[in-house]
Amino acid sequence: MEKREELFSGKAKSVFKTDDPDLFVLQFRDDTSAFDGVKVEKLKDKGKVNNLFNAFIMEKLEQAGIKTHFVKKLSGTESLVKNLDMLPVECVVRNLAAGSICKRYGIEEGLEINPPTFEFFLKNDALHDPMINDYHIVSFGWADPTHIEEMKKQTFKVNEVLKDLFKNGNMLLVDYKLEFGLCNDELLLGDEFSPDGCRIWDAETRNKMDKDRFRQDLGDVIETYKEVGARLGISFD
Ligand code: UDP
């Protein structure tokens, strides 16, 4: 496999073509952004930490029967993934209240959400990723009904796998965002799973161990990501 030219550069990752049109190289950069790209900083080692973290989680999900685009880790900051036709929606499941749901409904942070909620957002920074529902998705052609149901099913399945994984490391999986894409009409989990796209709290202290450390200027962002990884058994050396 030969890495070729850059196809796309996002806020934290770049996508490169390879000599195989079905495979891309995903490069995790140190760039960190929040508030739809308004707050941007480079955090040393973030690319490497998130690449290794994502590889570990994607492998766990594959082992649990969840189909993903992940093929293999290539280097400290790069992974090989399948070329997906990404659906322009974000899938969010919440176990505890934090972030936008608190502001939107006036809910206190930390309230247990039982049963966990599922929300769709439109992937569009310029519009600040507005919340959408199944009807919008079908009527505007962002995904078809079968894929909508499959995204919900897979996103909840991820919750079952990862809630336990984090619990074993004495952490709470508060919420997370997933993105899916199609590969020959098969729905696969795409993008990444790292502390950039989920909320993780220490189970006892409820100390924030995710990108809220960056959003809220709490400090020690990457040190804390490494601590989350260490509790899961990931080695970053
Ligand atoms: N999230 C994300 N990318 C986005 C929006 C949200 O990864 O563009 C993640 C976020 O890190 C959190 C979950 O999705 O784990 C729910 O985010 P929320 O709706 O609370 O929005 P936020 O408060 O992060 O703006």
Image: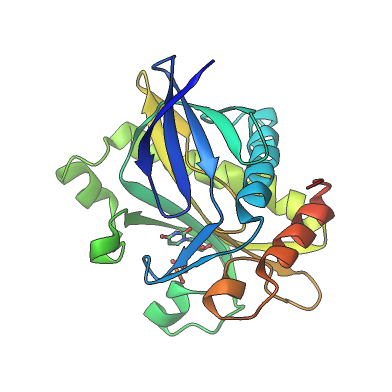
Q: Is residue 97 visible?
A: no
Looking at the image, the residue that sits furthest to the left is 139
Nearer the observer, 177 or 13: 13
The quarter of the image holding the N terminus is top right
> Residue 105 sits in which quadrant?
bottom left
Question: Does residue 25 sit above or below 18 in this rendering?
Answer: below
Question: Does residue 188 sit above or below 32 in this rendering?
Answer: above
Q: How is the image coloured?
A: rainbow
Residue at 66%, 55% in the rendered image? 45
Nearer the observer, 216 or 58: 216
Return the x and y of residue 141 as percentages of the image width and height: 18, 40
Return the x and y of residue 177 as percentages of the image width and height: 49, 54
Residue at 30%, 61% in the rendered image? 125
Residue at 75%, 50% in the rendered image? 164
Report the label total: 0
Residue at 54%, 50% in the rendered image? 29
Answer with left or right where residue 153 lies relative to residue 234: left
> Residue 146 sits in which quadrant?
top left
Question: Does residue 131 sit above or below 1 in this rendering?
Answer: below
Q: Is residue 236 visible?
A: yes
Nearer the observer, 198 or 109: 198
Answer with left or right where residue 123 lies relative to residue 209: left
Return the x and y of residue 101 as percentages of the image width and height: 44, 73
Return the x and y of residue 235 as percentages of the image width and height: 82, 46
